[in-house]
Amino acid sequence: MVSVSGIRGIIGESLTPEVITKYAAAFGTWCNGGTVVVGRDSRVSGEMVKTLVTGTLLAAGCKIVDIGIVPTPTVEITVNDMNAHGGIAITASHNPIQWNALKLIGPRGRFLTQSQMNEVLEIADRKSTLLATWDRIGKINYYDHAIQNHIDHILELEYIDVEALRKRNFKVVVDCVNGAGGVIVPRLLKELGCNVVVINEEPHGVFPRNPEPSVDNLKALEETVRQHQAHIGFAVDPDVDRLALVNEKGQAIGEELTLMIATDLVLSRKKGPVVVNASTTMGIDQIASMYGVQTHHTRIGEINVSIKMEEIDSVIGGEGNGGVILPEIHLGRDACTGIALALQYVLQKNKPFSECVAELPYFIMKKDKIELHDIDADAVMTKILKDQKKGRVDTVDGVKIIFEDGWIHFRKSNTEPIMRIIAEARTQERLDNMIQSFTSYFH
């Protein structure tokens, strides 16, 4: 599966050595034999994939900086800090254990834009890759300070009162899902003065649960927070770009609230525009409105949010899946930054986390999909648009109908014969009625 976010597939099936080397060679050629930072999450297949990637990049004459098992945002930060030509994060993010992927990163530490990815794909498809002669083969340097550098960037943020947090000594629980989070999150929390309880810490890559940090997958974290009477719980995905939160009562609050909390904190200290994707909770719009600033919506995809953030000098942005983007760190999602902002939020509010959350705008969201089979998705969306009389229409990515008390978003999948439907409203009754009113279009 090839998309703007990289090359993804199941090991031994769609992601084979031939596929891995094909695209690694194309990326090495695109980087013109320059410096490439390589890091990976903890997946069992990670070492095999990294060996293929680094060998191929060496053959293209690239100078490799191997930073080991690290979060994806750590790769991005290192690319930027080192002024490298690019980077490859070997991770399938929240996908199950049998998956892996090459996330391709450009020269400023961001995922490739669509045009940049098209250039790489053209090189791969035309087999116009460059191979170095024996005397120009690349070299590998091993760099073991990437994790600490990432932490240091967070500790230097103007929003974070490190000394006050250390004095507060929050008790926290973190679920690292045996991914790359185990090498950074406990260290960060200890640097922030927390009393830390860790579950699933060792980065061996055999995930103990579905690795996506959604509410249904956080039962062990909820129980551990209650057991240890912690102030807050954190869960990350295997490459640590998504963050979910659990309150002191041991209740997972949903990934949408991660970005709401970060946005509320940042805007309380610095006013400026906010950028999110089209499927992010309208709670962000309400928080931004409280501070007198505008929220901008983009197509789904981290790079689309990042591009818009840079264009308008946004102070914070992200995606509703727990992805916080703070430009002072880098223009990419980072769970570790989200953790520091969440702790500062509770410190600043000086009340239990559940009470902090209760003050935020409340919405209920539902995500679903419809198998299309013989249904013409484009025709359905055209008819939805034609029939709309009450709602405001947004076509930045699919079709989104926005009402005063909620919205519904239809988006055709680029990789599967399905229509993704996301809806949000203030009450369950309104949510159910809104979804029901559109189901007839698919029958």
Image: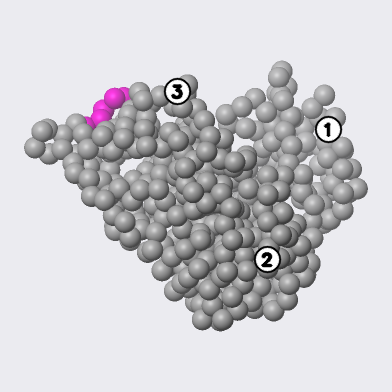
Q: Nearer the viewer, residue 172 or 372?
A: 172
For the residues labelled 2 and 1, the Cα–Cα distance comes to 43 Å
Q: Residue at x 58, y 31 (%)?
A: 414
Task: Residue 440 in the image: state x and y as whole percent.
Answer: 85, 30
Mark sitting earlier along the chain (2/1): 2
| Disc on res. 230 | 2
For the residues labelled 3 and 2, the Cα–Cα distance comes to 42 Å
Q: Secondary structure at mark 1?
A: helix
Eyeballing the image, is 11 above or below 152?
A: above
The furthest residue to the front: 227
Amino acid carrying label 2: it is Ala
| Disc on res. 439 | 1
Would residue 18 appear left or right of 266 to someone viewing this image?
left
Mark sitting earlier along the chain (3/2): 3
Task: Residue 60 in the image: state x and y as whole percent.
Answer: 22, 36
- Could one spot residue 314 in this view of the protein? no
Q: Residue at x 68, y 68 (%)?
A: 231
For the residues labelled 1 and 3, the Cα–Cα distance comes to 39 Å
Is 128 part of what is drawn in magenta?
yes
Span of residues in magenta = 124-130
Mark sitting earlier along the chain (1/3): 3
